[in-house]
Amino acid sequence: MPRTPADRETLNAAARHAPAGVLLGERGVERGGDLRAALSSTARAAAELLGGPQAGLVRECEAAPCTRLYVDASHRRTRRWCDMRGCGNRAKAAAFRARQHG
């Protein structure tokens, strides 16, 4: 998936800030911080994914108008949708209707 220098700079600018704090609370993991900290945590995770060993497996869902990204960990690397229960099911149902009425 192509990335421009402007895309990288936007991601890096968000990642430069301090990330959200993580604590072990009574109900499990608790995160704290402001919006900038939340964006930094998200940007750092995105940078590690897009620059790491799974970068070549990142795909965009083929279902219109979905724009979600996912990691294609399928055996043959032929996954087409972000989620079979939602986007995949709708796409397959539409193809079936088209075949029946076409």
Image: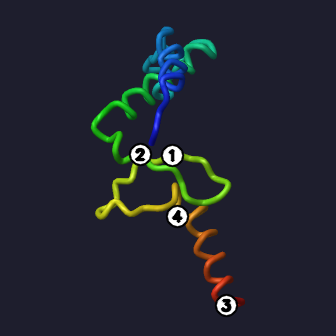
Identity, as a three-letter code, of the amino acid under mark 2: Val
Quarter-wise, where is residue 58 in the image? top left
Q: Do the residues labelled 3 and 4 touch (CB within 8 Å)?
A: no
Q: Which residue is drawn at 45% across and 30% down?
A: 46
Q: Which of marks 3 and 4 is nearer the N terminus?
A: 4
Q: What residue is disc 4 on?
A: 84
Identity, as a three-letter code, of the amino acid under mark 4: Met
Label 4: few (<14), some (14–19) or many (≥20) C-alpha neighbours in 10 Å: few
Residue 101 lies left or right of residue 55; in this view the side is right
Q: Are marks 2 and 4 in contact (CB under 8 Å)?
A: no
Q: Earlier in the sequence, mark 3 or mark 2?
A: 2
Above or below, comparing residue 15 to residue 78 in the picture: above
Q: Which of marks 1 and 4 is nearer the N terminus?
A: 1
- Calculate the distance from the C-alpha at mark 2 to the C-alpha at mark 4: 16 Å
Q: Which is closer to the viewer, label 2 or label 4? A: 2
Q: Which is closer to the viewer, label 1 or label 4? A: 1
Q: Which is closer to the viewer, label 3 or label 4? A: 3
Numbered label attached to residue 40: none
Q: What residue is disc 3 on?
A: 100
